Amino acid sequence: MTIVIEPATRVHRRGGYRARYLAGLAAVVLGVAATNLTSTYSLFFLLLGPAVQLTGWLVLPGALWRRLVVIVPGLVAGLVLIGGADFAGAWVVLLAGWLLVRHRPALSYLAVLPLVVTVFLLKFTLSEYSQNWLGLLIGAIVTVGCAWAAAWLASIRPVPGISERMPSVSE
């Protein structure tokens, strides 16, 4: 038995929870990745990436107001990542947006702290344009790890209706 309950699993008008979750997650990830493929010779990705990412944020299951609040910061963060390691702080914005859309409790936002430390390390260690791929890779891996850590932190919150005190052996 697990005490992890996703608040966004309620019945949706269109599509099931799992299908919307997987499609939204894939679209957000692919949108950010496509945006970062942009170069002088491939400006098409600058149009395609944000459009796919926007679709992903809208498809994800959750409260509509949360999905709408995340759209502009998420799109800007995806675009800013093109600038390289100096703008790696955009990973923090993307993770915070993910946590908001996923209805994570306040305790789970502590998982953002390792990402903030990683962002500063990336900024001070990567200085060449040729190292941008490394910054994107490390940022993505740490962001995914922090999202999993946030899900774990969300699962350890006290469950309403269950006593906070553990019974002693004599009881």
Image (cartoon, rainbow, N blue to C red):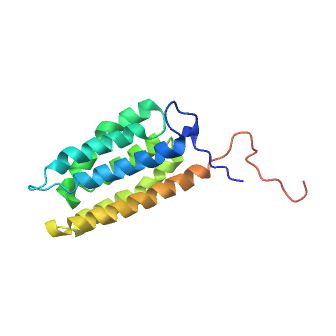
Is 11 on the left or on the right of 51, as rendered? right
The answer to which image quadrant residue 168 occupies is bottom right
Q: Residue at x 42, y 47 (%)?
A: 23
Which residue shows up at 51% across the image and 40% down it? 103
Residue at x-position 25% and y-position 53%: 34
The answer to which of 84 and 170 lies nearer the viewer is 84
Q: Residue 157's x, y, as percent?
A: 62, 48
Q: Is residue 19 visible?
A: yes
On the picture, is 36 further left or further right than 164?
left
72 in relation to 120, above or below: above
Residue 160 image offset from top left, x and y in percent: 69, 40
Residue at the far front in the pictured view: 15
Image coordinates for residue 4, horizontal then vertical, percent:
62, 49
Residue 90 seen by the camera: no
Left or right of 139? Residue 13 is right
Residue at the far left: name it.
40
